[in-house]
Amino acid sequence: MSAVLALPETLSTLTSHAGLLAATVPNPAPADPTSGSQGITLLLSYVKWGALIACGLTALASGGLMAVGSLSNRPDHVDKGKRAFLWALGGVIASAIAIPMVNTVFGAAGA
C-alpha cells in the first residue's frame, strides 16, 4: 500500500528530472555527409550522358538493321529495327524528362 501512496511523489520527481535531461541533450544541425564533394553530381552527369549516348547508338544501329533487312528481303529484321528505333526514342524521351527532374530534386535538396 505504501508503493501506491508514493506514486505521485515518484511521478513528480521523474517529470522534474525529465525536464532537466531534455534540456541537456544536444540537437545538432544536419550536415552534408559528402562535405561538399561533387562526386554525386559527377556520377549523375556520367550516367545521363551515358544514357543519351546509348540511346543514340541504338537508334543508329536500328536504322542499319532496317536498311539491311529491306535490302536483303528479310522483313523480320525490318520489324526488329523499327521496334528498336521506337525503344531508342522512348529512352531518349525518358532521359529528357528524367534529367531536369533529377536536377530539380537535387537543386531543391541543396537549397
Image (cartoon, grey):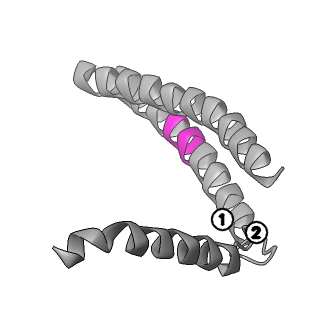
Foreground disc of the pair 1, 2? 2
| Residue to which mark 1 is pinned | 43
The amino acid sitting under disc 2 is Ala
If the image is split into quadrants, where does the N terminus sit?
A: bottom left
Residue 104 x, y percent position in the rendering? 74, 39
Magenta highlight range: 54-59
Is residue 20 shown above or below 4? below
**Marks 1/2: CA distance?**
27 Å
Mark 1 is surrounded, within 10 Å at the Cα level, by few (under 14), some (14 to 19) or many (20 or more) other residues, namely few
Foreground pick, 6 / 58: 6
Q: Is residue 55 magenta?
A: yes
Q: Residue at x 21, y 77 (%)?
A: 2
Q: How many marks?
A: 2
Say if residue 71 shows up in the picture.
no
Residue 40 screen position, x and y as percent: 68, 66
Instruction: Look at the magenta stretch and give its main secondary structure.
Output: helix
Q: Position of residue 7 (x, y in %)?
A: 32, 70
**Please, is residue 47 above or below residue 16 in the view?**
above
Q: Quadrant of residue 92?
A: top right
Residue that sits furthest to the left in the current view: 1
